[in-house]
Image: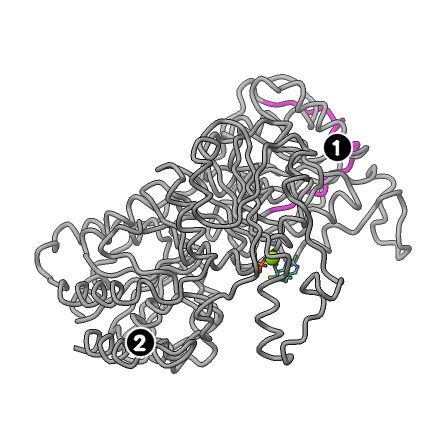
Amino acid sequence: MRKISVADYLIEFFIANGVTDVFGYQGGMVCHIFDSLATYRNAINFHCCCNEQGAAFAACGYAQATGNLGVVITTSGPGFTNALTGIANAWFDSVPVMLISGQVNTKDKRRNYTVRQFGFQEIQAVQMVEPIVKKAYDVDLGIDYVELLNDAYRVAFTGRKGPVYLDFPINVGREFIEVRDEILPVELEIPISFDASPYIDQLMNAKKPIIIAGGGINQCGLREEFRELVNLLKVPVVPTMSGTDLVETCSPYHVGFLGGTARRESGIVLKNTDFVLSLGTRMCNKAIGYNHDDFIPKAKKLIRVDIDTNEFERQLKDCEEDVTVDLRAFISSALIHARKIEKKYDHSLWVDSVHHMQSLMKNVDMTFGNELVKRFTEIMPEEAGLTLDVGNNLIYGEQSAVVKRKTRIFASNGLGSMGYAIPSALGIAVTKMPTYVISGDGGAQMNIQELNTVAKLHLPVKFLILNNHALGHIILFQDHYLNCRRVATTEVGNDYYSCDFVAVAKAYGIRSSRIRNVKELDQFIVELNDDEPFLIEVDFEDCSMLPNIHGGLDPLTNGPELPYSLVEKVRSIMES
Ligand SMILES: Cc1ncc(C[n+]2csc(CCOP(=O)(O)OP(=O)(O)O)c2C)c(N)n1
Ligand SMILES: [Mg+2]
């Protein structure tokens, strides 16, 4: 045994649990923790972002890319409040992140008094964060700090993953405690085994089965296993937005993501399937539509598999059967069974119909944004992380990004927060994964300061900023509901301001160029693959997001009108 400070123990705890990088911002209330980070800098990297929101998103990106714990360290008061958006993002997208924010000395804490503040920069952090974390810890003096951290780690990773919060008074970090010579990693429970075979048999006995694949598969690190399962079952996969990278674009079972912002192909498949197995998705109304009668209208059965039983409070269909189980147990059992029954079923007619339909639809609804994303992602290497922001740029990305074998796509799916793409990329890039960013001009400006962090760390992140000089996605709402009146969305009324991203990048020391058409991307194949950061600003007239059909509506008869012959042909293929 030996005696070390709690601040030192905290860092040794991270190292023991495989955390290689932490993110944060200095402050009086956390300077002891930063001092400890410096002590251990040979074993763990720390990255000082330019704003705590950026640090929290970076921790999300790091945790999403590695499966490790994402760590954010901020000071009390404003440091804590700045980080909240990133924590909300981790909550909705089930990302294991630990936020540690400093707090005033335990003897200066407000505790049960009703005054606004006792100490300077004191804030009621625990109460504020509680609804968006799995557990918030009001850390006090004299407690068992080893058990505290072990418990926080277990909570972040057990069941449906998510963020935890530690309110960490300055004097706690200075406490000395006795710890083992070697800090052991936290042991996590192995899921109890489960028999998935009855569910797989039901799926395979259907004529037109599909799998709806959600982000849970990514969060459980089951990408490879899931692909193997799909290749054995040989049925089409319709992912949610959080699962768009699960199946390669070239796979015979690939169908684009579902929802109100999706392309039509997934909607056509949903209208015709007779059996759905959904894995690790909450299937929000944005994805499946607000009138659930319109969702999978011909399905005789919907099996929903989720670890979070609370999700089933929201019943979607009369034909639904809910299965509360850890996806790791479900998929490993499903794989064993699928290997046994591989030759027993044949859905090739159904798979061929989906293919035929996709080939007929492939050039429909392609905008400039779609073409641009397609080419950009073709240029990306086989293994790469792509972060998307929010707005039309997200939709072009989700609809048209080419998914290669090792492409990962990250977005702020549940929270939908602009400003996610740049800082989360920073958290991914520190893991050495080649990292690419697609953002709109509005979202890029929300955390533009993190370009500075990327430049200072020499991270080879490649940025594609879609500058339509507008909050393009909100224009769609104005067109639909507000008689096309532009308020605070375009530069014309002088109440929204884009900027010169090429100049901003240069100011931070990042190489940059401006292009105006898709072909020009090809001039930068070298810069898009080398080991320095690079930013491309695409200056273009705002273009639409197509087909923009509300979830659940018939994709063949809504949205921009399709040629009659095409509609008839697709119908006859899919209904046969
Ligand atoms: C933090 C935050 N503020 C506001 C919004 C609402 N919102 C959603 S999309 C959007 C416009 C995004 O504009 P831009 O980043 O330029 O992307 P574009 O739609 O033009 O591609 C806005 C304001 C949001 N999602 N997040
Ligand atoms: Mg824009």
The answer to whether residue 512 is left or right of residue 356 is right
Label 2 neighbour load within 10 Å: few <14, some 14-19, many 20+:
many
Depth check, mark 1 against mark 2: the one in front is: 2
The answer to whether residue 4 is left or right of residue 304 is right
- Given residues 558 and 470, the one toward you in this image is 470
Say which residue label 2 marks. 271
- Element marked by disc 2: helix
The residue lying at 30 percent from left, 54 percent from top is 330
Say which residue label 1 marks. 26
The residue lying at 74 percent from left, 40 percent from top is 140
| Residue 521 coordinates in the image, percent (x, y) | 46, 42
Residue 371: quarter of image: bottom left
Residue 391: quarter of image: bottom right
| Residue 289 coordinates in the image, percent (x, y) | 45, 75
Q: Is residue 387 visible?
A: yes
Q: Which residues are magenta?
A: 164-179
The answer to whether residue 567 is left or right of residue 217 is left
C-alpha distance separating marks 1 and 2? 53 Å
On-image quarter of the N terminus: top right
| Mark 1 touches mark 2? (CB < 8 Å) | no
The residue lying at 39 percent from left, 82 percent from top is 293
Q: Would you say residue 173 sits in the magenta stretch? A: yes
Label 1 neighbour load within 10 Å: few <14, some 14-19, many 20+:
many
Please tell me whether residue 286 is drawn above or below residue 373 in the rendered image: below
Look at label 1 and name its amino acid: Gln
